Image (cartoon, grey):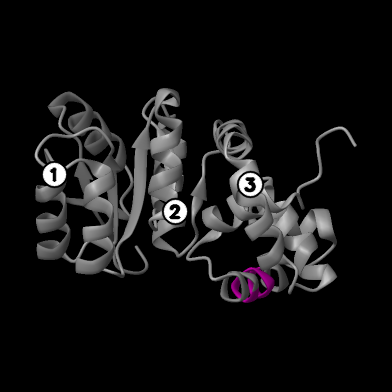
Amino acid sequence: MAGPRIRVVIADDEPLIRAGIRMILTSDPQIEVVAEAANGREAVEQARAHAADVVLLDIQMPVLDGLSALPELRRAVPDTRVIVLTTFGERENVLRALEHGGAGFLLKDTAPAELIGAVRATAAGDAYLSPAATRHVVEQLASGRAAARSEEARSRVAGLSERERDVLAVLGEGLSNADAGKRLHMSEATVKTYVSRILAKLGCENRVQAALLARDAGVVRDEGR
């Protein structure tokens, strides 16, 4: 097996959910579950103790919930990537988590292959947008707060070139670098370069924040047009 294994901490207050996630992740030889946590405080401690690459972080937990733990994780282990575990009923919480530096989100009923793919992608430095849920959730979140956010978003996007706006638009659709390249007739490497440049210009920490900003700014084309 090439390369070091991905070190993962699972943070959820339900033992059965932790056990299920552990069983799925450990079926991949590249992933190692180094610790489990039943609350946000333990998540921070275990992520620091094990130098975790990825933390799967539930929102609803005792002692310290996921939303409160996320900023602490970002301060304590800034190189650790955090994927928020959520349900459709927690949309506003998801938005807050992404704004505070979460690398993405997954629904708790995510298919095993998608869960493994999300951990791999996140560990590699990409923010993971769940294909099964992201477009719907992001659209709902963005539209609910568009009036308060759109003006600021348009101002931030104004400094992008036309091609950078094109790339930002497909980020807003949740496309991967490969799919974005096919859409825009660019190589995957070129898309990755553009994404890095866009994140720097917009002051976004990851692709998820950029996707939300794209929708707030109105640069994402409506489907069917």
Give residue 36's mark.
Answer: 1
Is residue 122 within the magenta segment?
Answer: no
Q: Relative to 164, say whether 143 is above or below.
A: above
Question: In the rendered structure, which disc, 2 or 1, sits on the residue that comes first in sequence?
Answer: 1
Secondary structure state at the residue bearing disc 1 = strand
Q: Which quadrant does the C terminus fall into? A: top right
- Amino acid type at circle 3 is Gly
- Amino acid type at circle 1 is Glu
Q: Is residue 137 left or right of residue 117?
A: right
Taking the spot 11% from the left edge, 38% from the top edge, the residue there is 38
Quote the CA–CA distance across marks 3 and 2.
16 Å
Q: Is residue 12 left or right of residue 120?
A: left
Is residue 196 within the magenta segment?
Answer: yes
Q: Are marks 3 and 2 in contact (CB under 8 Å)?
A: no
Q: Residues within 10 Å of mark 3 (few under 14, many from 20)?
A: many
Of circles 3 and 2, which is in front?
A: 2
Q: Position of residue 170 (x, y in %)?
A: 73, 53
Give the main secondary structure, helix, strand or loop, of the magenta stretch: helix
**Mark 3 sits on what residue?**
174
Q: Which quadrant does the N terminus fall into? A: bottom left
Of circles 3 and 1, which is in front?
A: 3
Question: In the rendered structure, which disc, 3 or 1, sits on the residue that comes first in sequence?
Answer: 1
Q: Which range of residues does the magenta coloring cover?
A: 192-197
- The answer to whether residue 177 of the structure is visible from this angle is no
